[in-house]
């Protein structure tokens, strides 16, 4: 993966899971996905900004079972 390549959706979900449920910090996440610590901070903070507990349609985000994308 080159420096400017973005993570896939599946990789982003995995990174969020590792951070939120496994307690990984940004440095190990960056190493796992071939990114810098700063790149991971930026990526995950942008994801957090774009999501909240509910969307305009009333759907509840954050209510899917853990690792739902792997099932």
Image (cartoon, helix red, strand yellow):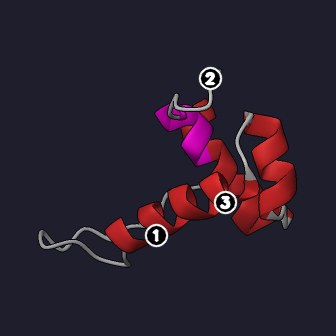
Specify whether 26 is left or right of 67: right
In the rendered image, the quadrant that contains the C terminus is top right
Q: Please, which residue is most extreme toward the bottom here?
A: 53
Instruction: Give the mark nearer the N terminus: 1 vs 3.
Output: 3
Q: Please, which residue is most extreme toward the top here?
A: 1
Magenta stretch in the rendered image: 7-13
Q: Secondary structure at mark 1?
A: helix
Tell me the number on the disc at residue 2. Answer: 2
Q: Which of the 4 image quarters holds residue 37?
A: bottom right
Q: Could you tell me how far apart the alpha carbons at marks 3 and 2 are, in whole angstroms?
A: 15 Å
Q: In percent of the image, x 67 and y 49: which residue is there?
A: 15
Q: Which of the 4 image quarters holds residue 61?
A: bottom left
Tell me the number on the disc at residue 48. Answer: 1
Q: Which of the 4 image quarters holds residue 69?
A: top right
What main secondary structure does the magenta stretch of the protein show? helix
Specify whether 23 is left or right of 63: right
Magenta run includes residue 31: no
**59 w.r.t. 69: above or below:** below
Q: Please, which residue is most extreme toward the front here?
A: 3
Instruction: Give the mark nearer the N terminus: 3 vs 2.
Output: 2
């Amino acid at each position: 993966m080159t420096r400017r390549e973005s993570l896939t959706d599946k990789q982003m979900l995995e990174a969020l899971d590792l951070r939120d449920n496994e307690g990984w910090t940004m440095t190990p996440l960056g190493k796992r996905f071939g990114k810098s610590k700063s790149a991971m901070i930026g990526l995950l903070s942008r994801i957090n900004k774009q999501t909240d507990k509910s969307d305009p349609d009333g759907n509840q985000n954050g209510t899917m079972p853990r690792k739902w994308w792997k099932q």
